Amino acid sequence: MPTAGTPAPESRQTARATTTDPRPAAAGSPRRIAITGAGPGGLYAAALLKRLDPARDITVWERNAPDETFGFGVVLSDETLGGIEHADPVVHEALQRDFVRWDDIDIVHRGGRHTSGGHGFAALGRHRLLEILHDRCHSLGVRIHFRTEAPPPHVLSADHDLVIAADGINSATRAAYAPVFRPQVTEHRCRYIWLAADFAFDAFRFEIAETEHGVMQLHGYPYAADASTVIIEMREEVWRAAGFDELGAHESVERCAKIFADALSGRPLRSGKSAWTTFRTVVNDRWSHGNVVLLGDAAHTAHFSIGSGTKLAVEDALALAACLEEQPGLPSALAAYEEERGPVVASTQRAARASLEWFENLGLYLRQPPRQFAFNLLTRSRRVTHDNLRLRDAHFTGAVEREFDCPPGTPPMFTPFRLRGLTLRNRVVVSPMDMYSAADGVPGDFHLVHLGARGLGGAGLVMTEMVCVSAEGRITPGCTGLYTGRQTEAWRRITDFVHTRAPGTAIGVQLGHAGRKGSTKLMWEGMDEPLPHGNWPLVAASPLPYRPGSQIPRRLSRAQLTDVREQFVAAAWRAARAGFDLLELHCAHGYLLSGFLSPLTNHRTDAYGGSLEKRLRFPLEVFDAVRTVWPAERPMTVRISATDWAEGGTTADDAVEIARAFAAHGADAIDVSTGQVVAEERPEFGRSYQAPFAERIRHEVRVPVVTVGAISSWDDVNSLILAGRTDLCALGRPHLYDPNWTLHAAAEQGYEGPGAGWPDPYRAGSRRPRTGRTDAPKPRLSLGGRGG
């Protein structure tokens, strides 16, 4: 995000990095401080540090003029304002006088305008914010050199106790010490331009324009009584198709005003120094080196769609000043600053990434019902959820629920869902979880209690662990199977219990073959480590070990492929006899069928390797063969890894085609997981981090999906379901923590309907037990307003 004090962009190919060591970090509180960049973060850091210790010598370098900046309005949260008020009431009071406040968000799409209230925004002009900070710095005795390039970082670090690099997204300081900071810069797929309008929107406005060239969007908000920020954004290919790449600045602005004439009521836009650009996400492994520290966009960026650039920079300044005040020396202060801010920034960047990707893929959601589309937009970052949106605006959220056909008083997660001949009473799935507790593949009392308890716990569907189709297809000696009659009868005992004692709960079986990831120790003895003895031979698409030291599998011949396929068929036949309601084919996580799908694990040159179409051939043959013996009225799903999280592996684009192929062959739903295919993967973990992959498949393939991965709260489930991002949510760890998770979710929401029926013996426990008193007694006397 552009900031004042940003050096001219440098070429990443030609930028020369220096490894000159900065001055060793000084002991005690720094007295002589250099700051590069007079954006909000740099100026606020200067003011705070000078206010805390007036004896400090603080100098700020800024290459631009005082009144020269990029962008127009700045949005700050109440949390950030509270920190400013506590740290510097003078700045806070000045900000308060100029803030424009509003509560509503308007979403305008296909002729409809939907408003959600209760959000609480505060904004002011960027020029005015800088003026306030300039005045505060001057009043405190901070020197600011405008129109002046800062000396090189190694010169500053030699002459000062502390160097704060607030020099923006193109930070020269970060480039100078790139081998230490190890920055990663990711360029995204949309073009955008910062503009302004000379009138004030009455809400934060999102407007969607479906043009002959593609989808474009407007983000607009007021920042003064007579002015608004307007950001126009679109995919790169749309930008080029519309001819913006060939237009001058003036013509571009006029074209934008014409496209969004309704939002602007025919009024013009102005651009200042803005130009079309692409957003870049900046991440650094480290934020400090010796006595040099990064702050704001130099250290990190977050997409403007969640309004966090200035907010993060100001909060960085607050945290850095506090750590310098609290810690005994500079090294510990800088370490504490990074330790405090790192997780906060990482969380914000995950939310920003989810938001920017939502807008990149905006075209996927245009067919959604109008209010669901608005709800999806509002909850895109996963920070705004169903529950807190309902607290902000119950009327809007209730309208979305009615459009979704939620019966009165029914949370979205407790609406039924039909797959073929099976109707699930709610949208909660107990995810398959390997228990490694079987003997000779036979599930025992542990499995009866484990699955039975979760069946009683209220979920719509309880899934078994991966049940192996042969002894050689097991992951560990403790894995269950369906390759003998004894195993079939043992599973029948479990399904009978669930159907009899937990009526309304369905139970599904996941069939799989470990492939190259087999013959390993039990998880708690050494996950993915080969057995010390008693190993069985492994087979796979290609003779590639899972990791160094793992057993090398044999490449499956054509005849062996037929044998394995028949093992799946026999296991499916036994699963039907055992009474399972649903069958899932495991084509994920690097197990045998997944190993055929990924180019990282399938190096075959025959009809089963090479192109994606050929890599799909064997998994589809298995699916088709299983479907012929699985009862027609019972649904069949497929679990896939939507990305390998590794270079050269399966991509999200591949996942769409894989899902499309299985859907064409009759899959009733796709269970969308990710990774675990290669040991060198680098997953991007985070809250509901796999949901975007499922969402894309749902909208592009038009097939029901199951979302899994870091979904931990009933609020997350409601949000994902109501936004149309998924049809079912599978939760694993929450059900390990609490077998009655679904029933407790119903109780906590005050829901007592058919989507979460309590077993009769448990009905007395359907209300949360009382706890000890948590409210403190009120004081008997109040002296408020009295003198003395």
Image (cartoon, helix red, strand yellow):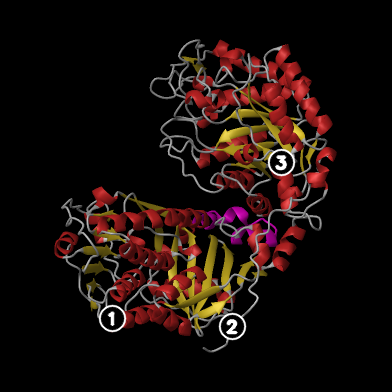
Q: Position of residue 491 (x, y in %)?
A: 73, 21
In the picture, residue 678 is in which quadrant? top left
Q: Is residue 780 left or right of residue 317?
A: right
- Looking at the image, is mark 2 or mark 3 nearer the viewer? 2
Q: Indicate which disc, 1 or 2, sits on the residue closer to the N terminus.
A: 1
Majority secondary structure of the magenta segment? helix
Quarter containing the N terminus:
bottom left
Answer whether labels 1 and 3 touch (C-beta < 8 Å): no
Distance from disc 2 to disc 3, alpha carbons, whole Å, reads: 49 Å
Answer whether labels 1 and 2 touch (C-beta < 8 Å): no
In the current view of this chain or complex, which residue is farthest to the bottom? Answer: 787
The three-letter code of the residue at mark 2 reads: Leu
Q: Indicate which disc, 1 or 3, sits on the residue closer to the N terminus.
A: 1
Name the residue that disc number 3 marks: 740
Name the residue that disc number 2 marks: 783
- Looking at the image, is mark 1 or mark 2 nearer the viewer? 2
Q: Is residue 25 left or right of residue 359?
A: left
Identify the element where label 3 is drawn.
loop
Residue depicted at x 35% and y 69%? 41
The three-letter code of the residue at mark 1 reads: Leu
Asked whether the viewer can see residue 446, the reply is yes
The three-letter code of the residue at mark 3 reads: Asn
Q: Is residue 318 left or right of residue 626?
A: left
Identify the element where label 1 is drawn.
helix
Check residue 153 in the rendering and tell me which mark sits there, or answer none: none
Q: Position of residue 213 (x, y in %)?
A: 53, 60
Distance from disc 1 to disc 3, alpha carbons, whole Å, reads: 59 Å
Check residue 140 in the rendering and tell me which mark sits there, or answer none: 1
Pointer 3 local density, CA inside 10 Å: few below 14, some 14–19, many at least 20: some
Q: Which residues are magenta?
A: 356-378
Q: Indicate which disc, 2 or 3, sits on the residue closer to the N terminus.
A: 3
